[in-house]
Amino acid sequence: MAKKSAVNRNEAVKALVKKFAEKRAALKAIANNESLPLEERFEARLKLAKLPRNSAAIRIRNRCEVTGRPRAYYRKLKMSRIALRELGSQGQIPGLVKSSW
């Protein structure tokens, strides 16, 4: 069996998050609803705990769209500082002006 790269693993996590998002949101709404009985809320928490861990959105790692690099990630541009600098110096990012680097 081939070992998954971190980028492929992250894509699999994104797919799981998308698949279970609706179910997870419904269970969270029940679990956090103070007007419902304690037993019902506890049952919702148990069902939530049985869902796959990787179906939680917090498990998604922000990665550069260009290189897949996880560090130094700019959210607005969805890329790492290295890719930003490279594409910026080639003039491929509109509005980005090189001041000094």
Image: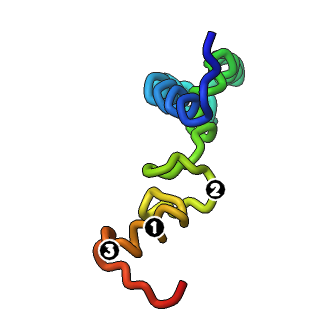
Amino acid beneath label 2: Arg
Amino acid beneath label 3: Gly
Name the residue furthest top. 1
Instruction: Name the residue nearer the viewer: 81 or 33.
Output: 81
The N terminus - image quarter: top right
Closer to the N terminus: mark 3 or mark 1?
1
Q: Is residue 101 above or below residue 79?
A: below
Which residue is disc 2 drawn over?
71
Q: Is residue 58 shown left or right of residue 64?
A: right
Instruction: Say which element carries label 2.
Output: loop
Identify which residue is drawn at 50% across, 52% down.
Answer: 64
- Residue 86 shows which numbered tag? 1
User: Label 2 vs label 3: CA separation?
Assistant: 23 Å
| Residue 40: quadrant of the picture | top right
Identify which residue is drawn at 40% across, 73% down.
Answer: 88
Identify which residue is drawn at 56% across, 59% down.
Answer: 73
Q: Is residue 30 above or below residue 85?
A: above
Q: Residue 45 at x, y = what percent?
A: 68, 23
